[in-house]
Amino acid sequence: MRLIILWLLYTLSLTAQALSGNMSYKDTMANDVPENIRQNGFIYCVNGIVTTFNPQLASSGLIVDPLAAQIYDRLLDVDPFTYRLIPEVASKWEVLDNGATYRLTLRKDVKFQETPWFTPTRNMNADDVVFSFSRMFEVNHPYHYISGGHYPYFDSLQFANSVQSVRKLNNYTVEFRLNAPDASFLWHLATHYAPILSAEYADHLSRINRQEMIDWRPVGTGPFRFDDYQAGQFVRLLRNNHYWKGQPRMEEIVIDMGAGGTGRISKLLTGECDVLAYPAASQLSVLRDDPRLRISMRSGMNIAYLAFNTSKPPLNQLKVRQAIAYAINNERLMQSIYYGTAETAASILPRASWAYDNQAKVTDYNPELSKKMLQELGLENLTLDLWVPISSQSYNPSPLKMAELIQADLAQVGITMNIRSVEGRFQENQLMDRSHDMTLAGWATDSNDPDSFFRPLLSCAAIASQTNLSHWCSPSFDEILHKALLTEQLAARIDYYHQAQQILSDDLPVLPLAYSLRLQAYRFDMKGLVISAFGNTSFAGVYRDMSEYAQKIKPKQEQQP
């Protein structure tokens, strides 16, 4: 633990030195925003933190949503309306050897961003793809251990053991050869955890011995390039004028992370924010009543859940986990947290998934049964800690409030629950030492494949990658997931995933809580915003309708007859 703390202090010091710029927060935000930002850019308010500017290194946080889709591109994408795989910087792909080999053809017109710290001399090619993935999979790669050598999403999938090779066949063709067929493989290439980095930039940093900057001064191919960052306050992005899909409509985006709770909605109401991510459902009536604002909602590929630390007594006992589940009033959570914007979850897999088991059942609310079970176990006066993330998320707009409601429910059956607020890397490092009892958590993915939920959250390998917060390991469960990857027959995969859901229901390492709508509020003059079930969409097509902006709509009370 001491080494972890020292490493964190070093990282924060390095980050502050590397990223401090001349722009002050006051010059960028609030009422001091220059008029050209109102005309040529917008301010996106979100509650969260930045722990890296490379999504390969993250399991959550602002680099995953919303930053990754602005700075980087991936080989493939997921259509937000049809949920199908579509080309991104790879123009086409072939599946060979019954799903054990994947050959992708790259576009030839994709340029990397020009930045003050690096000017590329060539377009993106196969060298960049090989570098981006080899860095994660090959322990002997010169960049593997830069920034710690921890790649949570792909580590949880054991991709280092699954991928035999990543080869450049020619400048614009790359081939992934796997040790065994994997029907989910292409979907993982479409996640924001698989950005394409610049091998040329990496070579440049190696020559000047600044390799760690690849994760803090990013160079991608996305619609916007990184410009400035002030920790806990904002990230500023500027338009990539050489973006291969065409020039983005806005010159500048400011990601404001300087306000939480009611402070964010206040900024939207006063015009200090143009877009508000994940507004609390309790605030929707206020937002709906303001004629200057609009709200978008869409079903989300996400899950909020309670993770039990199954490696720690007494939660290593199934009956204790069941007793806690019976004590939680799911209906009250829906009413008090989501206000009609979510449904109680019956499975870790969202209802929108093609592998969702319609036979899955929500755990009954039965506090009397919970008390009886605890008495039989001799645990009438149990005390537990619940670790809770601070930031609102698409799957849980008010995590601390939810924790307080669960705390009250458990008190009714004799369990004293202490709430511990944690955040960011500190949460990951604390969870790694397995000292927690329960964790209020969630997961959202930009993939429509069930494997993007099951393996990162509940496989044995995901314990080491710090995404399996229950520390539950079931070889039989892992074997079912493996069998589901070996077949391309949809009916067979569905059957395997139904078996997996039944195992989770029987053993209860996690308690599913809610499937939430994705919410976004924005000013009336903002156009082109797309909200996807998978989250994290590009802002390249966003613009401000200046004809509406010029009308300067008056407050509601002045418009009433």
Image (cartoon, grey):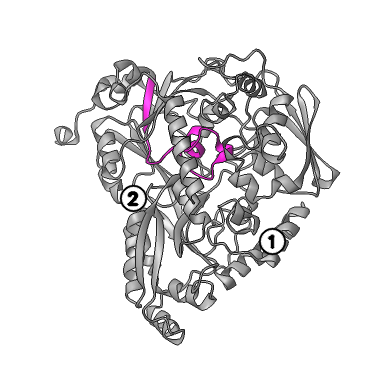
501 over 61 or under it: above or below: below
Question: Residue 505 in the image: x percent, y percent?
Answer: 57, 70
Q: Residues within 10 Å of mark 2 (few under 14, many from 20)?
A: many
- Residue 143 found in image quarter: top right
Q: Is residue 558 magenta?
A: no
Q: Which mark is residue 478?
A: 1
Q: Which region is colored magenta?
A: 41-67
192 over 504 or under it: above or below: above
176 over 210 or under it: above or below: below
Question: Residue 26 in the image: x percent, y percent?
Answer: 28, 24
Q: Is residue 56 magenta?
A: yes
- What is the three-letter code of the residue carrying label 2? Ala
Q: Toward the viewer: 509 or 353?
A: 509
> What SS does tag 1 mark?
helix
Q: Residues within 10 Å of mark 1 (few under 14, many from 20)?
A: some
Extreme bottom residue here? 376
Q: Residue at x 58, y 21 (%)?
A: 245
Find disc 2 in the rendering and name its residue.
281
- What is the three-letter code of the residue carrying label 1? Asp
